[in-house]
Amino acid sequence: MSSSGAGKRVDYGGVAIAAPTTIAYERFSRRPAQWWIGRALREMIECAGLEVRAVDGLSVSSFTLLPDTVVGLTEHFGLTPRWVDQIPMGGASALVALRRAARAVQARDADIIACIGGDTNGPDSFGATVAGFSRFSQDAMYPYGAAGPNANFAMITRAYMQKYGARREDFGAICVAQRENALKTPHAMMKRPLSMEEYLSARLIADPLRLFDCVMPCAGAEGFLVLREETALSLGIPYVRLLSAIERHNAFPEDDIQLRGGWAVDVGDMWSMSGVRPDDIDLFESYDDYPVVCMMQIEDLGFCRKGEAAEFIRSHTLTVNGSFPHNTSGGQLSVGQAGAAGGYLGTVEAIRQLTGQTFGPSVRNARYALVSGFGMINFDRGVCSAAAILGLGRAGG
Amino acid sequence: MVRDRNSRLKGPGPCSGSVTPAPPRPSSHAAFVLAAYAAEGSLVLQHCDECGAVMYPPREICPACLSDGLSWRAENGDGVLIAETTLYSSTSAYFRERLPLRVGAIRLDVGPVIAAHLRMNAHAGDRVRVTAVTDRSGNAAFIASAQRERCDMGEETLIEEFICHPRNRNVLITNVSTPTGLAMVKSMRDHGARQIYAGCADPSIEFAGKNVLTEMQGVSLAALDLRSSSSVATLARQIGHELDILINTSHSLRHGSITCAGSYEAARSDAEIEIFGLMRLFEAFAEPMRVKASGVGLTSGAWVNIFSIYALANAPSCGVSAALQAGAFSLSQSMRAEFAGCGVKLLNVFHDNDGAEDSRWSSAVAAATLDGLCRGLETVVVGVRARDIYKRWREDPSVLERELVEQ
Ligand SMILES: [Zn+2]
């Protein structure tokens, strides 16, 4: 598989991303997805000092919005946009939304686009989402223990450990560092520090995965605005630039079991378009539904060679102040997985870090961030992968 | 059928508080195709008519060439177990009661990767053979076992539930005064049944093999006259609550076309057993068997009907009797629907005997029934001719009808 198209891609020059927005997560909520998404919309336009009608584009991602679509939300929220989009890509949603919105503002099909991921979580809604996730999973995974992603990623984790020699402690290092990062994130589901002993001895979920390898489903919303740099400057708001972005779906379908993602196809394009190198990256927000996926991203996005992520982790510290700041707000593993908002968490945190709008400590002098997304276990593997490199545009107060 | 489905077999009863939940019923056309073949013990996969690609999960369009010409074909299920896990957690209440569960991913020799339940002897890297079976809700479920050794079926709670081995189960055989009934008793006893109730209309009347039966350990004669609602209800009150397997051996095929003198009276008399007898059995035994099978303890039950293959397509030389069996077969379909999700599997055994029952033939029917129970099948066909007719019926019943006229 090759990443090259007919020619060089047009860059994302002039695109700004601003107003990182998070509606504080709740473990369970009686509010529907419409409420969570609507709250995020209001917060981001207030953050940017905008009138509602200035928002002329809306992109949403949600598993629990049905029977509504983005169209219903325009009427619900009183918007009259000239550009709407709905991205059903789970953990890849934010980056796919960002790519599309970036092109729309570049082409002036829209001026200010609100991109939002939000979901509610009732006591049964996670099970319902798993049960109804895809036709393939209904036909071919559900009869085997309502397997859901836990079973798939348990098999992937074990296969990865066997092939590349990763140990439980290496996955634990990711989880323990993220927990430390999460302790300063006020709405994180996980409030207590996590020790390696607790990680290793937690109850089994799907061998070898234990409790702290898995995310906690919750309700929440995250979002940001995509606009042109000149608009951001005239509004006087902090923003980041989009240096490069890639996405790929159903890569490597011939692989027995998923030990790599679609990033490996497009990683060269991503770095060459961005003009920066892995050493320049100040923080990495990876998609962390399971720690093995973080390792796949560290490799496939070029921080080390394939199979060497465990060694890479052993030689780095992953906390905000560490040598390789990773999932700096705690990631989904500690903050919680608010449905499609989980796909937004990393992008929103990267914008916060670069513009100095974090909840907790920030990475010193951060100028470049790599954000990665991964989503949709349609049958036995994650189908969507995406990544973007963000650079500081204008810092906040 | 939709009307009051819940109030009949699944209504609140004395044991409803402990009734075990069931997995969701199949919902796609492909899921029903997989299940219909799994019910016969076949694992089928889609093949592309244009490029030959083999695919799974089921699709509408070939991922290799975008053709929509996809046909189902039986596979031998051989492959390699490429990854495995043991689940200790599930989002489904049904599976939560059955943890831990071993599941794995298998690369089949014919191409695709599938998910399957794992037998105890199957481990990552092993050559495995995958078989298909229907689960409690009628979904096709795949089971992988290692090719190199026999299975230890000891602790496979969930897989045990897909099948209904007679070991330690209580069995009712509705009519033992025929060679088939007798062979069925012997087979169940030889394979570990705990208690066998040998039904006969009047236990005081002599019949061939009666003395053999009465000397068998764990076998007791039971008065059961399918022509009498009170007889059926009385036995159900006595033993229904402990019954795991009911084998209805009361159907018999009689010669005689619709033009024969007295065919109407004969049909009316036979209908009391073939049609109304089956309904009486269902009315009396279905609810207690459902309660037993869906109670705590993770068990399963089975209801077996022994039919002539002519229940599927009429042979005019025994046209009246075949019509009654067709009616009974149709009833069995509605019984299967009523039992769905409760753990009682409905097994129809079709045979091709159209004369006297000899003991060799009867033993073959009993052996096929046992095999069907042990493999969790819902359809078993015994005999070369029956298998031929069954195959032609699956292919095209309207052609078969015309062909049978000429035989
Ligand atoms: Zn094809």
Image (tube, rainbow, N blue to C red):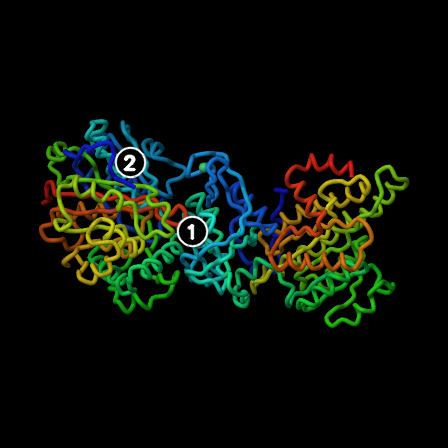
| Kind of residue at badge 2 | Ser
Residue B212 image-quadrant placement: bottom right
- Report whether residue B329 is seen: yes
For the point 70% across and 49% down, the residue is B384
Question: Height in image: B5 above or below A320?
Answer: above
Question: Height in image: B119 above or below B60?
Answer: below
Q: Quadrant of the N terminus of chain B?
A: top right
Residue B172 image-quadrant placement: bottom right
> Left or right: B240 with respect to B154?
right
- Report whether residue A41 is seen: no
* Kind of element beneath mark 2: strand
Circle 2 sits on which residue?
A59
For the point 53% across and 60% down, the residue is B158
Disc 2 sits on a residue from what chain?
A
Q: Quadrant of the C terminus of chain B?
A: top right
**Residue B334's spot in the image, x, y percent?**
66, 46
